[in-house]
């Protein structure tokens, strides 16, 4: 896609530039059975039945507040849909339409038992559909941080956008785009907390790259920490973990010494707060073979006395 394409420039300037008018003030026209797709600014308004439309699979938004939907539904039932939806002909189902912007109005209209709504019909490609959906939701602050990050990632992975291009399209800084994308490196459990609004970006950003991010995030929620408190807690937690990997308590040292006396080999025990490792050092293949035999025989080598006892047991049994 050529960046100099005027249609793409319109996307970066927002939805009003795409429509070429104030969508809230756009008058509805008589119903049309087969509106022609239009890809130029200043799209006319037509009306379509709700049952001919479906949400776009490219829509980054997945969470819709029930209270807000009910309030919008009540408003639509009283005043109708004031701002037209933006749709395109469904590329997979001829005769149907894919919602590019306005899924929340579509859902609320269903609840209000409205059968037709005003729409703009356009011919955007998949990349542009995702761009417009991101722009609309970001302008309305309707996306969670994770939904925003997933939208950016799709533009990068599926449509070949650079982070700079994504930033240009949505009107954000490149640093904002990069930092938002980093949220996707958090464990799924932390992303779920973000999606549910139980934590903020400021609370979980310090957890990026930490192996215990999910458990720390749950503690942040449980203790009701502020973003500043969460950052200090995460730093302190990481420092304690690093110290635990280096320093060993007296019980661990005593256990190492006991195992060394029992096996005759150098033993090292490491513990990271949840689990750990036991290491046995050897300097030759003969020692390795000896360790394997010890482990195979319950941790000890059969002595001559053991062998005599086994022989006596066999003779008695015979």
Image: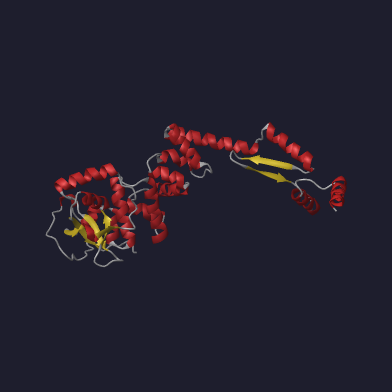
Indicate the quadrant containing the N terminus: top left, top right, bottom left or bottom right. bottom left
Residue extending furthest toward the bottom:
94
**Residue at image x 79%, y 39%?**
261
| Percent position of residue 8, x then y | 30, 59
Quarter of the image where one finds residue 40: bottom left
For the residue pair 115 and 36, the one nearer the viewer reads as 115
Residue 256 versus residue 305: which sits nearer the camera?
Answer: 305
The percent coordinates of residue 112 (x first, y second) are: 19, 49
Relative to 185, 50 lies left or right? left
Q: Which of these two is toward me, 292 or 24? A: 292
Q: How is the image coloured?
A: secondary structure
Q: Residue furthest left?
A: 30
Whole-percent x, y for residue 292 in the image: 75, 51
- Residue at the location (35% across, 48% down)? 172
Can you see residue 234? yes
Where is residue 268? Give x, y as percent: 71, 42
Question: Residue at horizontal 24%, vertical 53%?
Answer: 106
Residue 22 visible here? no
Apparent side of residue 105 relative to residue 151 in the rendered image (left or right): left
């Amino acid at each position: 896609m050529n960046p100099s394409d005027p249609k793409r420039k319109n996307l970066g300037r927002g939805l009003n530039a795409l429509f070429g008018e104030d969508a809230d003030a756009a008058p509805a026209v008589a119903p049309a059975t087969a509106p022609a797709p239009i890809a130029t600014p200043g799209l006319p308004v037509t009306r379509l039945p709700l049952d001919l439309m479906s949400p776009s699979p490219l829509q980054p938004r997945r969470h819709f507040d029930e209270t807000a939907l009910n309030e919008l539904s009540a408003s639509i039932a009283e005043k109708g849909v004031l701002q037209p939806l933006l749709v395109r002909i469904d590329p997979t189902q001829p005769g149907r339409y894919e919602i590019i912007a306005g899924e929340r109005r579509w859902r609320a209209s269903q609840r209000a038992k409205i059968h037709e709504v005003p729409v703009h019909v356009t011919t955007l490609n998949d990349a542009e559909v995702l761009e417009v959906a991101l722009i609309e939701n970001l302008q309305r602050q309707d996306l969670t941080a994770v939904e925003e990050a997933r939208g950016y990632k799709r533009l990068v992975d599926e449509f070949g956008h650079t982070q700079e291009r994504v930033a240009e399209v949505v009107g954000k800084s490149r640093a904002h785009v990069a930092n938002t994308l980093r949220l996707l490196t958090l464990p799924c459990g932390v992303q779920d907390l973000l999606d549910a609004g139980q934590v903020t970006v400021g609370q979980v950003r310090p957890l990026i790259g930490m192996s215990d991010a999910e458990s720390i995030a749950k503690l942040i929620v449980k203790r009701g920490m502020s973003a500043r408190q969460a950052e200090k807690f995460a730093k302190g937690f990481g420092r304690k973990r690093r110290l635990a990997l280096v320093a060993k308590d007296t019980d661990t040292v005593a256990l190492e010494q006991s195992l060394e006396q029992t096996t005759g080999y150098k033993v090292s025990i490491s513990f990271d707060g949840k689990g750990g490792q036991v290491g046995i050092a050897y300097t030759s293949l003969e020692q390795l073979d000896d360790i394997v035999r010890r482990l195979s025989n319950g941790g000890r080598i059969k002595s001559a006395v053991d062998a005599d006892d086994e022989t006596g047991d066999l003779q008695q049994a015979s």
